[in-house]
Amino acid sequence: MSRIELLRKLLYYLQAERKRRQQEASRYDWKNLARKNQLPPQGPWRTWLILAGRGFGKTRTGAETIRHWIREGVCRRIALIGETEIETRQVMVEGPSGLLAIHPPAERPLYTPSKGELSWANGAIATCFSAEAYEHLRGPQFDAAWVDELAKFREGQNVWDQLMFGLRIGKFPRAIVTTTPRPVALLKNLLKNPSVAITRGSTFENAKNLAKPFLEYVRHHYEKSWLGRQELYGDLVEEKEGTLWTPPLLDRAKKAYQKDVSLRRLIIAIDPAVSHGNNSDETGIIAAGVTSEGIGVILEDLSLKGSPSQWIQKAIDAYHRLKADRIVAEVNMGGDLVEQLLRTYDTSISYKAVRATRGKVVRAEPIVSLYEQGKIWHADYFPALEEQLCSYVPGQTRKSPDRLDALVWALSELMFTRPSVRKIWEG
Protein backbone atom coordinates (compact mmCIF):
# COMPACT_ATOMS: atom_id res chain seq x y z
CA MET A 1 0.00 0.00 0.00
CA SER A 2 1.40 3.34 -1.04
CA ARG A 3 1.79 6.27 1.29
CA ILE A 4 -0.92 8.19 -0.60
CA GLU A 5 -3.39 5.30 -0.29
CA LEU A 6 -2.61 5.01 3.40
CA LEU A 7 -3.25 8.72 3.90
CA ARG A 8 -6.52 8.46 1.99
CA LYS A 9 -7.71 5.60 4.20
CA LEU A 10 -6.68 7.46 7.30
CA LEU A 11 -8.53 10.56 6.10
CA TYR A 12 -11.60 8.48 5.31
CA TYR A 13 -11.46 6.92 8.78
CA LEU A 14 -11.10 10.32 10.47
CA GLN A 15 -14.03 11.74 8.51
CA ALA A 16 -16.20 8.72 9.33
CA GLU A 17 -15.28 8.96 13.01
CA ARG A 18 -16.01 12.68 13.01
CA LYS A 19 -19.42 12.04 11.44
CA ARG A 20 -20.15 9.29 13.98
CA ARG A 21 -19.28 11.59 16.87
CA GLN A 22 -21.44 14.37 15.44
CA GLN A 23 -24.36 11.98 15.10
CA GLU A 24 -23.83 10.73 18.63
CA ALA A 25 -23.60 14.29 19.93
CA SER A 26 -26.84 15.24 18.17
CA ARG A 27 -28.54 12.20 19.67
CA TYR A 28 -27.77 13.50 23.15
CA ASP A 29 -28.28 17.20 22.41
CA TRP A 30 -31.47 17.67 24.39
CA LYS A 31 -31.76 21.41 23.77
CA ASN A 32 -32.17 20.75 20.06
CA LEU A 33 -34.22 17.57 20.43
CA ALA A 34 -36.68 18.84 23.01
CA ARG A 35 -39.89 20.65 22.28
CA LYS A 36 -40.22 24.05 23.92
CA ASN A 37 -42.49 22.78 26.70
CA GLN A 38 -39.96 20.06 27.57
CA LEU A 39 -37.37 22.63 28.65
CA PRO A 40 -37.40 24.14 32.16
CA PRO A 41 -39.52 27.29 32.39
CA GLN A 42 -38.06 30.63 33.43
CA GLY A 43 -38.66 32.10 36.86
CA PRO A 44 -37.96 31.37 40.53
CA TRP A 45 -40.17 28.30 40.75
CA ARG A 46 -39.50 25.62 43.36
CA THR A 47 -41.49 22.85 41.68
CA TRP A 48 -41.92 22.21 37.98
CA LEU A 49 -45.15 20.25 37.53
CA ILE A 50 -45.60 18.57 34.15
CA LEU A 51 -49.17 17.37 33.60
CA ALA A 52 -49.26 15.54 30.29
CA GLY A 53 -50.78 12.61 28.45
CA ARG A 54 -49.29 9.18 27.87
CA GLY A 55 -46.36 9.25 25.46
CA PHE A 56 -45.79 13.00 25.78
CA GLY A 57 -42.17 12.41 26.78
CA LYS A 58 -42.50 13.07 30.51
CA THR A 59 -39.89 10.51 31.53
CA ARG A 60 -37.34 11.83 29.04
CA THR A 61 -38.02 15.38 30.23
CA GLY A 62 -37.50 14.41 33.87
CA ALA A 63 -34.29 12.52 33.17
CA GLU A 64 -32.86 15.22 30.92
CA THR A 65 -33.63 17.91 33.50
CA ILE A 66 -31.72 16.00 36.17
CA ARG A 67 -28.85 15.43 33.73
CA HIS A 68 -28.72 19.16 32.96
CA TRP A 69 -28.78 20.16 36.63
CA ILE A 70 -25.94 17.77 37.43
CA ARG A 71 -23.84 18.81 34.44
CA GLU A 72 -24.25 22.49 35.38
CA GLY A 73 -23.37 21.79 39.02
CA VAL A 74 -26.81 22.95 40.17
CA CYS A 75 -27.36 19.88 42.32
CA ARG A 76 -25.31 17.13 43.96
CA ARG A 77 -27.81 15.18 46.07
CA ILE A 78 -30.91 14.07 44.20
CA ALA A 79 -33.98 12.05 45.24
CA LEU A 80 -35.61 9.86 42.56
CA ILE A 81 -39.12 8.83 43.62
CA GLY A 82 -41.40 6.44 41.74
CA GLU A 83 -44.59 4.68 42.77
CA THR A 84 -42.74 1.45 43.60
CA GLU A 85 -39.13 0.37 43.87
CA ILE A 86 -39.50 -1.55 40.59
CA GLU A 87 -40.94 1.44 38.72
CA THR A 88 -38.23 3.77 40.00
CA ARG A 89 -35.61 1.36 38.72
CA GLN A 90 -37.21 0.19 35.47
CA VAL A 91 -38.63 3.54 34.34
CA MET A 92 -36.59 6.36 35.85
CA VAL A 93 -33.17 4.70 35.83
CA GLU A 94 -32.99 1.76 33.41
CA GLY A 95 -35.86 2.58 31.04
CA PRO A 96 -35.43 3.64 27.39
CA SER A 97 -35.89 7.27 28.47
CA GLY A 98 -34.32 6.83 31.89
CA LEU A 99 -31.16 8.35 33.31
CA LEU A 100 -28.76 5.70 32.02
CA ALA A 101 -30.07 5.81 28.46
CA ILE A 102 -30.07 9.58 27.99
CA HIS A 103 -26.43 10.13 29.02
CA PRO A 104 -23.63 9.88 26.44
CA PRO A 105 -21.44 6.88 27.28
CA ALA A 106 -18.58 9.11 28.51
CA GLU A 107 -20.91 10.92 30.95
CA ARG A 108 -23.01 7.96 32.09
CA PRO A 109 -23.26 7.62 35.87
CA LEU A 110 -22.23 4.51 37.75
CA TYR A 111 -25.34 2.64 38.83
CA THR A 112 -25.27 0.39 41.90
CA PRO A 113 -28.63 -1.45 42.01
CA SER A 114 -27.99 -2.99 45.43
CA LYS A 115 -27.74 0.50 46.92
CA GLY A 116 -30.31 2.08 44.61
CA GLU A 117 -27.76 4.75 43.82
CA LEU A 118 -26.30 6.53 40.80
CA SER A 119 -23.04 8.43 41.07
CA TRP A 120 -21.50 10.87 38.59
CA ALA A 121 -17.87 11.71 37.99
CA ASN A 122 -18.34 15.21 39.46
CA GLY A 123 -19.49 13.74 42.78
CA ALA A 124 -23.25 14.08 42.33
CA ILE A 125 -25.34 11.22 43.75
CA ALA A 126 -28.97 10.27 43.04
CA THR A 127 -30.79 7.89 45.38
CA CYS A 128 -33.84 5.82 44.41
CA PHE A 129 -36.94 5.79 46.61
CA SER A 130 -40.32 4.09 46.52
CA ALA A 131 -43.49 6.00 47.36
CA GLU A 132 -44.67 2.88 49.17
CA ALA A 133 -41.82 3.35 51.67
CA TYR A 134 -42.04 7.12 52.07
CA GLU A 135 -40.64 6.89 55.62
CA HIS A 136 -37.24 6.26 54.02
CA LEU A 137 -37.28 9.93 53.03
CA ARG A 138 -36.88 10.84 56.69
CA GLY A 139 -33.28 11.76 57.43
CA PRO A 140 -31.68 12.22 53.98
CA GLN A 141 -31.38 15.72 52.60
CA PHE A 142 -31.40 16.84 48.98
CA ASP A 143 -30.94 19.82 46.71
CA ALA A 144 -33.06 18.35 43.89
CA ALA A 145 -35.72 15.72 43.29
CA TRP A 146 -37.54 14.05 40.45
CA VAL A 147 -40.96 12.56 41.26
CA ASP A 148 -42.59 10.40 38.57
CA GLU A 149 -46.37 9.71 38.37
CA LEU A 150 -47.16 11.48 41.63
CA ALA A 151 -50.92 11.27 40.97
CA LYS A 152 -50.74 7.45 41.24
CA PHE A 153 -49.21 7.38 44.73
CA ARG A 154 -51.45 5.86 47.40
CA GLU A 155 -49.79 8.01 50.07
CA GLY A 156 -49.07 10.97 47.84
CA GLN A 157 -49.46 13.64 50.53
CA ASN A 158 -47.18 11.79 52.95
CA VAL A 159 -44.56 11.31 50.23
CA TRP A 160 -44.71 14.98 49.32
CA ASP A 161 -44.50 16.15 52.94
CA GLN A 162 -41.42 14.04 53.66
CA LEU A 163 -39.76 15.18 50.43
CA MET A 164 -40.38 18.84 51.24
CA PHE A 165 -38.73 18.40 54.67
CA GLY A 166 -35.69 16.82 52.99
CA LEU A 167 -35.35 19.28 50.10
CA ARG A 168 -33.29 21.66 52.21
CA ILE A 169 -29.70 21.99 50.98
CA GLY A 170 -28.03 23.92 48.19
CA LYS A 171 -28.67 27.47 47.02
CA PHE A 172 -32.11 26.84 45.56
CA PRO A 173 -33.45 23.26 45.96
CA ARG A 174 -35.97 22.29 43.30
CA ALA A 175 -38.17 19.39 42.25
CA ILE A 176 -39.56 18.25 38.93
CA VAL A 177 -42.82 16.28 38.94
CA THR A 178 -43.83 14.32 35.83
CA THR A 179 -47.30 12.80 35.94
CA THR A 180 -50.48 12.01 34.09
CA PRO A 181 -53.11 13.87 36.12
CA ARG A 182 -55.81 12.48 38.35
CA PRO A 183 -58.25 14.52 40.45
CA VAL A 184 -56.44 13.99 43.76
CA ALA A 185 -56.23 16.65 46.47
CA LEU A 186 -52.43 16.89 46.38
CA LEU A 187 -52.40 17.72 42.68
CA LYS A 188 -55.16 20.29 43.09
CA ASN A 189 -53.19 21.99 45.87
CA LEU A 190 -50.01 22.08 43.78
CA LEU A 191 -51.90 23.73 40.94
CA LYS A 192 -52.85 26.55 43.31
CA ASN A 193 -49.33 26.98 44.72
CA PRO A 194 -47.61 30.15 43.39
CA SER A 195 -44.16 28.53 43.67
CA VAL A 196 -45.18 25.79 41.20
CA ALA A 197 -44.50 26.23 37.47
CA ILE A 198 -47.00 24.26 35.40
CA THR A 199 -46.53 22.69 31.98
CA ARG A 200 -49.35 20.87 30.19
CA GLY A 201 -49.09 18.68 27.13
CA SER A 202 -50.82 15.98 25.11
CA THR A 203 -49.87 12.60 23.72
CA PHE A 204 -50.19 13.91 20.17
CA GLU A 205 -47.42 16.50 20.57
CA ASN A 206 -44.98 13.60 20.41
CA ALA A 207 -46.70 11.88 17.47
CA LYS A 208 -43.50 11.58 15.39
CA ASN A 209 -42.01 9.26 18.03
CA LEU A 210 -45.13 7.14 18.57
CA ALA A 211 -46.48 4.23 16.54
CA LYS A 212 -49.15 5.23 14.03
CA PRO A 213 -51.45 2.26 14.92
CA PHE A 214 -51.31 3.33 18.58
CA LEU A 215 -52.28 6.91 17.74
CA GLU A 216 -55.13 5.75 15.49
CA TYR A 217 -56.44 3.39 18.16
CA VAL A 218 -56.44 5.86 21.05
CA ARG A 219 -57.98 8.59 18.88
CA HIS A 220 -60.81 6.28 17.88
CA HIS A 221 -61.47 4.72 21.28
CA TYR A 222 -60.56 7.36 23.85
CA GLU A 223 -60.20 10.85 22.39
CA LYS A 224 -63.73 12.03 23.21
CA SER A 225 -64.03 10.33 26.61
CA TRP A 226 -63.18 11.65 30.07
CA LEU A 227 -60.47 8.99 30.21
CA GLY A 228 -58.99 10.38 26.98
CA ARG A 229 -59.05 13.91 28.33
CA GLN A 230 -57.02 12.68 31.28
CA GLU A 231 -54.73 10.09 29.73
CA LEU A 232 -54.17 11.72 26.31
CA TYR A 233 -54.55 15.44 26.87
CA GLY A 234 -53.35 15.67 30.47
CA ASP A 235 -56.49 17.40 31.70
CA LEU A 236 -57.36 17.25 35.37
CA VAL A 237 -60.85 15.80 35.05
CA GLU A 238 -62.85 16.96 38.03
CA GLU A 239 -65.76 14.99 39.37
CA LYS A 240 -68.98 16.61 38.16
CA GLU A 241 -71.12 17.74 41.07
CA GLY A 242 -74.26 15.67 41.49
CA THR A 243 -73.15 12.61 39.53
CA LEU A 244 -73.89 9.13 40.85
CA TRP A 245 -70.70 7.55 39.50
CA THR A 246 -67.21 9.07 39.74
CA PRO A 247 -63.93 8.32 37.89
CA PRO A 248 -62.23 6.94 41.06
CA LEU A 249 -65.18 4.60 41.61
CA LEU A 250 -64.82 3.20 38.10
CA ASP A 251 -61.03 3.03 38.38
CA ARG A 252 -61.44 0.86 41.47
CA ALA A 253 -63.87 -1.41 39.62
CA LYS A 254 -61.28 -1.91 36.87
CA LYS A 255 -58.37 -2.52 39.25
CA ALA A 256 -60.35 -5.10 41.23
CA TYR A 257 -61.09 -7.24 38.17
CA GLN A 258 -59.61 -10.74 38.22
CA LYS A 259 -59.02 -12.44 34.88
CA ASP A 260 -60.34 -15.92 34.16
CA VAL A 261 -62.90 -15.69 36.96
CA SER A 262 -65.77 -18.18 36.58
CA LEU A 263 -69.29 -16.82 36.16
CA ARG A 264 -72.48 -18.54 37.28
CA ARG A 265 -74.63 -16.32 35.05
CA LEU A 266 -74.00 -14.17 31.98
CA ILE A 267 -76.58 -11.97 30.28
CA ILE A 268 -76.89 -9.42 27.48
CA ALA A 269 -78.91 -6.31 28.43
CA ILE A 270 -80.45 -4.01 25.81
CA ASP A 271 -81.80 -0.49 26.13
CA PRO A 272 -83.25 -0.07 22.62
CA ALA A 273 -83.41 3.21 20.76
CA VAL A 274 -86.99 4.03 19.75
CA SER A 275 -85.98 5.62 16.45
CA HIS A 276 -83.30 5.28 13.80
CA GLY A 277 -81.72 8.34 12.23
CA ASN A 278 -78.86 10.80 12.41
CA ASN A 279 -80.23 12.37 15.59
CA SER A 280 -81.48 9.21 17.26
CA ASP A 281 -80.01 7.78 20.45
CA GLU A 282 -77.70 4.80 20.58
CA THR A 283 -78.94 1.41 21.60
CA GLY A 284 -77.26 0.42 24.83
CA ILE A 285 -75.98 -3.16 24.81
CA ILE A 286 -74.05 -4.42 27.84
CA ALA A 287 -72.69 -7.92 28.44
CA ALA A 288 -72.36 -8.70 32.15
CA GLY A 289 -71.99 -11.66 34.47
CA VAL A 290 -71.98 -12.56 38.13
CA THR A 291 -69.46 -14.74 39.96
CA SER A 292 -70.32 -17.48 42.43
CA GLU A 293 -69.24 -15.04 45.16
CA GLY A 294 -71.83 -12.51 44.04
CA ILE A 295 -69.54 -10.06 42.23
CA GLY A 296 -71.06 -8.41 39.19
CA VAL A 297 -68.72 -8.12 36.19
CA ILE A 298 -69.18 -5.74 33.24
CA LEU A 299 -67.64 -7.71 30.38
CA GLU A 300 -68.33 -5.72 27.21
CA ASP A 301 -69.98 -2.53 26.03
CA LEU A 302 -71.44 -3.32 22.62
CA SER A 303 -73.65 -0.24 22.29
CA LEU A 304 -74.09 1.28 18.85
CA LYS A 305 -76.16 3.64 16.75
CA GLY A 306 -77.89 1.66 14.05
CA SER A 307 -81.05 0.18 12.70
CA PRO A 308 -83.07 -2.33 14.76
CA SER A 309 -81.75 -5.17 12.59
CA GLN A 310 -78.17 -4.06 13.30
CA TRP A 311 -78.43 -3.81 17.07
CA ILE A 312 -80.50 -6.97 17.46
CA GLN A 313 -77.94 -8.92 15.41
CA LYS A 314 -75.15 -7.49 17.59
CA ALA A 315 -76.94 -8.70 20.72
CA ILE A 316 -77.62 -12.15 19.25
CA ASP A 317 -73.99 -12.56 18.16
CA ALA A 318 -72.80 -11.63 21.67
CA TYR A 319 -75.34 -14.04 23.21
CA HIS A 320 -73.90 -16.98 21.31
CA ARG A 321 -70.24 -15.90 21.39
CA LEU A 322 -70.23 -15.41 25.16
CA LYS A 323 -72.59 -18.34 25.83
CA ALA A 324 -75.01 -16.10 27.68
CA ASP A 325 -78.05 -17.55 29.40
CA ARG A 326 -80.47 -14.68 28.69
CA ILE A 327 -81.12 -11.46 26.84
CA VAL A 328 -82.82 -8.79 28.93
CA ALA A 329 -84.37 -5.73 27.29
CA GLU A 330 -86.34 -2.70 28.41
CA VAL A 331 -89.71 -2.53 26.65
CA ASN A 332 -91.21 0.69 28.01
CA MET A 333 -90.62 2.61 24.78
CA GLY A 334 -90.03 -0.16 22.26
CA GLY A 335 -92.98 -2.33 23.25
CA ASP A 336 -92.73 -5.80 21.74
CA LEU A 337 -90.11 -4.73 19.18
CA VAL A 338 -87.21 -6.62 20.77
CA GLU A 339 -89.15 -9.85 21.16
CA GLN A 340 -90.46 -9.68 17.60
CA LEU A 341 -86.95 -9.13 16.25
CA LEU A 342 -85.51 -11.95 18.32
CA ARG A 343 -88.23 -14.35 17.14
CA THR A 344 -87.42 -13.36 13.57
CA TYR A 345 -83.71 -14.10 13.90
CA ASP A 346 -83.45 -16.82 16.53
CA THR A 347 -86.28 -18.45 18.48
CA SER A 348 -83.91 -20.47 20.68
CA ILE A 349 -82.75 -17.46 22.70
CA SER A 350 -83.89 -17.06 26.30
CA TYR A 351 -85.44 -13.62 26.64
CA LYS A 352 -86.88 -11.48 29.41
CA ALA A 353 -88.67 -8.16 29.00
CA VAL A 354 -88.24 -5.62 31.79
CA ARG A 355 -90.31 -2.51 32.43
CA ALA A 356 -89.35 0.60 34.36
CA THR A 357 -91.90 1.10 37.12
CA ARG A 358 -89.59 3.39 39.09
CA GLY A 359 -87.56 6.46 38.14
CA LYS A 360 -84.06 6.15 36.70
CA VAL A 361 -82.39 7.47 39.85
CA VAL A 362 -84.24 5.02 42.11
CA ARG A 363 -83.15 2.16 39.86
CA ALA A 364 -79.56 3.37 39.59
CA GLU A 365 -78.80 4.14 43.24
CA PRO A 366 -78.69 0.48 44.41
CA ILE A 367 -76.26 -0.23 41.56
CA VAL A 368 -74.03 2.68 42.59
CA SER A 369 -74.10 1.28 46.13
CA LEU A 370 -72.75 -2.02 44.80
CA TYR A 371 -69.87 -0.13 43.16
CA GLU A 372 -69.14 1.63 46.45
CA GLN A 373 -69.04 -1.74 48.23
CA GLY A 374 -66.55 -3.09 45.69
CA LYS A 375 -69.07 -5.63 44.38
CA ILE A 376 -68.82 -4.59 40.72
CA TRP A 377 -65.81 -5.18 38.50
CA HIS A 378 -65.03 -3.87 35.02
CA ALA A 379 -63.15 -6.28 32.76
CA ASP A 380 -61.71 -3.41 30.72
CA TYR A 381 -61.82 0.34 30.22
CA PHE A 382 -65.09 1.30 28.54
CA PRO A 383 -64.54 4.96 27.60
CA ALA A 384 -67.97 5.81 26.19
CA LEU A 385 -69.80 3.97 28.97
CA GLU A 386 -67.65 5.55 31.68
CA GLU A 387 -68.08 8.99 30.14
CA GLN A 388 -71.84 8.54 30.32
CA LEU A 389 -71.79 7.21 33.89
CA CYS A 390 -69.59 10.04 35.15
CA SER A 391 -71.48 12.80 33.36
CA TYR A 392 -75.04 11.78 34.24
CA VAL A 393 -76.57 14.19 36.76
CA PRO A 394 -80.11 13.29 37.86
CA GLY A 395 -82.56 15.98 36.91
CA GLN A 396 -80.03 17.82 34.71
CA THR A 397 -78.83 15.44 31.99
CA ARG A 398 -81.25 15.67 29.09
CA LYS A 399 -79.84 13.11 26.68
CA SER A 400 -81.01 9.57 27.34
CA PRO A 401 -78.13 7.62 28.94
CA ASP A 402 -78.57 4.46 26.89
CA ARG A 403 -75.39 2.67 27.97
CA LEU A 404 -76.07 3.57 31.60
CA ASP A 405 -79.62 2.19 31.35
CA ALA A 406 -78.40 -1.06 29.82
CA LEU A 407 -75.81 -1.42 32.59
CA VAL A 408 -78.45 -0.83 35.28
CA TRP A 409 -80.78 -3.40 33.73
CA ALA A 410 -77.96 -5.94 33.45
CA LEU A 411 -76.77 -5.59 37.03
CA SER A 412 -80.31 -5.41 38.43
CA GLU A 413 -81.11 -8.72 36.76
CA LEU A 414 -77.88 -10.35 37.94
CA MET A 415 -77.63 -8.93 41.46
CA PHE A 416 -81.23 -8.46 42.63
CA THR A 417 -83.26 -11.07 40.75
CA ARG A 418 -83.43 -14.63 42.01
CA PRO A 419 -82.50 -17.08 39.23
CA SER A 420 -85.53 -18.91 37.86
CA VAL A 421 -86.03 -21.96 35.70
CA ARG A 422 -84.78 -21.21 32.19
CA LYS A 423 -87.51 -20.22 29.77
CA ILE A 424 -87.20 -19.53 26.10
CA TRP A 425 -89.59 -16.56 26.27
CA GLU A 426 -90.47 -14.71 29.45
CA GLY A 427 -92.48 -11.50 29.51
Image (cartoon, rainbow, N blue to C red):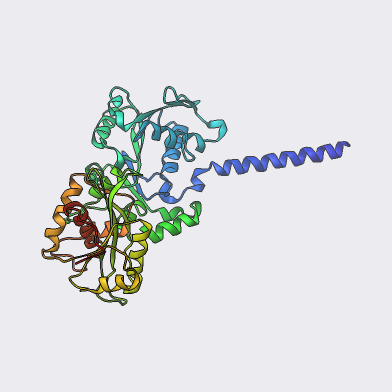
Residue 317: % across, % down: 37, 63
Which quadrant, please, contains the N terminus? Answer: top right
Residue 140: % across, % down: 32, 23
Which residue lies at the image location 43% right of the left edge and 47% below the top edge?
Answer: 57
Residue 156: % across, % down: 26, 37
Which residue lies at the image location 60% right of the left edge and 41% below the top edge?
Answer: 24
The answer to which of 358 and 277 lies nearer the viewer is 358
Where 215 sits versus 141, above or below?
Answer: below
The answer to which of 128 and 402 lies nearer the viewer is 402
Where 111 sits versus 385, above or below?
Answer: above
The answer to which of 386 and 93 lies nearer the viewer is 386
The image quadrant of residue 318 is bottom left
Residue 32: % across, % down: 51, 47
Left or right: residue 5 versus residue 216 is right
Which residue lies at the image location 34% right of the left edge and 31% below the top edge?
Answer: 130
The answer to which of 12 and 365 lies nearer the viewer is 365
Q: Residue furthest right?
A: 2
